[in-house]
Amino acid sequence: MQKFFSNRKLIIVMIVIIISMGLTAFSVSVRNSEKTPPLVQRFGNDVVGVVDHVVALPANSIKGSFAAVSNLINTYEENGKLKAQLDDLAQTRTRANTLQSENKELKKQLKLDKTLTDYSQLNAAVLTRSPANWQNNLVINKGSLAGVKKNMPVMAGSGLVGRVVEVNGTNSKVELLTTDNQSANRFAAEIITDDGTANGIITGYNQATSQIKMGQLNSDAKIKVGDTVQTSGLGGLTPRGLYIGKVAKVKHDDYGLALSVLIKPAVDLDNFSVVTVIERQLVGD
């Protein structure tokens, strides 16, 4: 019985298809015939239009789906290209800013070179500076192969920043003015005042105010804020006249004599990447 109904459904579908095809053929012949009455032609046209709509609807749907998928793929690819362009733009901007900063520092070094007449200079770049020892030392990319020697002073821009304490073939360690190492070989410095000079020693660094400390002053000269501080040349290793900074504050005792001085450094001691190593030119060199 079930097989009979199944066959019956199949027969009905086939009959419907045959009738539809027949109606279509009939409607086409009627529509194209000049002898057919107008009413019958309109009926034929309507049947053809309905059949065309039924057949075209699934095809248009499939075509629209393919178009939507294609547009989605194109949009994804365009987004990928735009993202890559943005990444390239960010990298280019970062590189441009870095080059601009380096160019500014190199210009400072050129101005410094013009003021150094009695000693030779060697430009170098900061290779590493550990956050754990940020105030104590750093490593530069020049060593004994480039002529660097121990105890040579090191400047950045127009200001003194430290001294070479260890030399390797291709790099050197620099101990900074800001070091808290009590056994460090401190720089002998002098303050240029209106009525003479005051000699002393660089003794440390005030991290809270970013100022250099100078003590052991042995002069009665009247020191005031704004006086120039430079290396004195005492000790024979460091040339005289290397700029350190300006007097920012003077501390006095009960007798009115200066005990210590705070110096505003000539260079930002936390932010430099190019340095100049100084070699004193002795008489006869």
Image: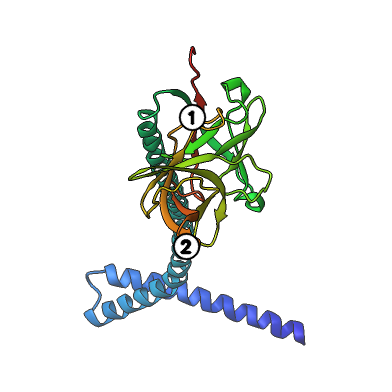
Image quadrant holding the N terminus, namely bottom right
Residue 249 x, y percent position in the rendering: 43, 58
Residue type (three-letter) at the residue carrying disc 1: Pro
Q: Does residue 62 sit above or below 272 in this rendering?
A: below
Q: Is residue 134 or residue 227 the one in the foreground?
A: 227
Disc nearest the viewer among 1 and 2? 1
Q: Is residue 62 or residue 167 the one in the foreground?
A: 167
Residue 224 x, y percent position in the rendering: 37, 54
Q: Is residue 12 or residue 96 the one in the foreground?
A: 96
Q: Looking at the image, tell me whether mark 1 or mark 2 is earlier in sequence order.
A: 2
- In space, the residues marked 1 and 2 are separated at their CA atoms by 71 Å
Label 2 SS: helix
**Coloring applied to the structure:** rainbow
For label 2, the crowd category at 10 Å Cα-Cα, with few meaning under 14, some 14 to 19 and many 20 or more, is: few
Residue type (three-letter) at the residue carrying disc 2: Leu
The residue tagged 1 is 239
Q: Does residue 45 sit above or below 252 in this rendering?
A: below
Label 1 SS: loop
Q: Is residue 215 visible?
A: yes
Residue 148 x, y percent position in the rendering: 58, 25
Which residue appears at 46% of the width and 76% of the height? 20
Which residue appears at 60% of the width and 31% of the height? 151
Corner quadrant of residue 56: bottom left
Q: Is residue 266 visible?
A: no
Which residue appears at 52% of the width and 31% of the height? 238
Mark identifier at residue 72: 2
Residue 136 x, y percent position in the rendering: 62, 47
* Side of 182 where 50 appears, left or right: left
